[in-house]
Image: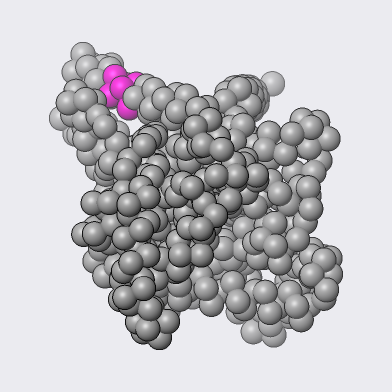
Amino acid sequence: MSDGDENKHRGKQAGRLHRGLSVLALAFLVLLHLAVSLSYSGGYAESWDAVDFVLALDRYDIFEMQPHFPGYPLFILLGHLFLSLTGEPVRALTWVSAVCGSLSLVPFYLLARRMLGSGIRVWLAVMLFAVSPLLTLTSVQPMSEAMGLFLVLTMTAWLARAVDADEKKMLGIGIVGALLFAMVLGVRTSYFPVGVLLLFPLLTFYAVRRQLAGLVLQTFIVGAVFLCGLLAWLLPTASTEGGLLPYWQLGQAFTVGHFTEWGGTSLSSEQGMWDRMWAWSFERMLLNGLLGVDLNGPAAPLSTLMLWFIGGLMVEAVWLGGRGVLGAWRRSHKRGAGRLIDWFQKNPRIWFGLLAVVPYALWMFFGQNSEKARHILPLLPWVFLLMAYGWGELYRKVRLAFAQRGLARTSSAFRTVQVLSASIGLVIFASLADRQLSVLLAHMAPPPALQMIQYTQKHYPAGGAYIYTWEEQRLFDYYAPDYVSERVRSYSYFVKSILLQSATTSQFLMTNAVLDGFGPDHPLRQQVREVARFAQDPFVYPTYHTVILYELPREAVERLQRDAEALTPTLDSAPDASGSFATSSVTTVP
């Protein structure tokens, strides 16, 4: 064997060893993440949507919001499979989230390999994903986000093969991608913008072949396969509601309500565009998505200082990554990529990222509730990739600077820089892991709304108390069905209900969500008496992190009766002068 052949053989052996170690490291990380998620998996239906999903395991009925439209059939189906293992509906759904959340590391690793190459950048991105407090919280909740993100990442990693594959394979890549996208919609319909990625293999084929007829044919085939995959779950789901027409009518009503009433979208929210941009970029992405904290959460001065230090490093990494991507784009333009299709061919990774990020970012900004951090989940992996790329670019520039000054990589100065960089990295990952653990521990305790229900059961008789709520009503229906609770929609509605119930009810209770809905200066605030307060980490429970139970004294009830008798014509004919509930304090879960 010649020296060249021997070196080539050694290179292949080293490559196989590196891949084997990478597989072992990834498997260890997945199993560790799964063990932690299962150990800290939640045992409570903590929100309106969570109760909907849990009830769907007992009786699937979209009309009765078990669950709400579009029905999440694949998530519920997988929940039934786990129900046979756990015997408990909430635990079954959290196990689905735990398994899918842990397995998401695999497609994300493959996506990182495709977008960043091999080496330290890939593992930086994977570790950011593994210790993310928000992704970990998603993995222990009885919700569909973890499974939806797993399918989105699987679809994205598969379609990313088109970045380097031969154009002859584009049709096969597109067909499998279409089936995966149909599965995504069966779990999280709100993730529909990621379907734009199906254009990538089609455009790649056209960029190489320049055959319009071939592009049209492949688009038709991929679209037909997607339609078949969609109908595979859509028709059985619609049949549970009496057919496609009733199912379509349910969807229309839900969509109108989402965009015009309670969805917290740009149409139904009072937020201005700049306020929404601040909420999405700073509060949701930086604080919730990257750091796993909330503006309303308590923090010691030292931890606050560390928080801003880490946040600054993360923002710098995103900035450096963005500059690197923009530089690559400009260099390709200087090489003579004149037409748009030429730019596409010379920058496949950049275009792939844009197709994955821009459509969903626009949908998130205009069509989703800016108070819910879970809506940023499809974008968060791309931020991790950008951060890892930015840190890699910074390290590359440092090495280049040392080389230009004639300093070897073995010099003491370069070693010092390496040690300092590793120390900063350890501080970042250790801080995120510590925050991750505190989030898991907080989530193990009963949510504030459930604590309020347990307190009510302990201190008030079921037949003698009437409780006015907002979203907490769904938890009352599930955990305390023998108690009478009513969801209040306006002050006039509340007064009329008091008048109807006052003759047969001895005690009236209400939550702070109801009182906040009447406005900050409503006179009723001076009449109610606080009886209990329950609080938790606002990052874990963003809307109902503080639940206050009030009692309406008998004197206040009598005063409402007297006022109502004097204003009976107004209550019967005039519009509600107090207005409806404020979106910022009482919003239903989309």
The question of residue 425 being in magenta is answered with yes
Front residue (pair 528, 217): 528
Front residue (pair 571, 156): 571
- Residue 219 in percent (x, y) is at 69, 77
Q: Residue at x 53, y 30 (%)?
A: 458
Q: Which residues are magenta?
A: 422-429
Q: Does residue 225 appear in the picture of this structure?
A: no
Q: Residue at x 38, y 27 (%)?
A: 435
The question of residue 430 being in magenta is answered with no
Q: Residue at x 78, y 37 (%)?
A: 83
Q: Is residue 341 above or below residue 36?
A: below
210 with respect to 326 (left or right):
right
Q: Does residue 493 appear in the picture of this structure?
A: yes
Front residue (pair 453, 113): 453
Snapshot quadrant of residue 536: top left
Snapshot quadrant of residue 32: top right
Q: Quadrant of the N terminus?
A: top right
- Residue 462 in percent (x, y) is at 59, 41
Q: Is residue 448 above or below residue 355?
A: above
Q: Is residue 437 above or below residue 298?
A: above
Q: How is the image coloured?
A: one colour
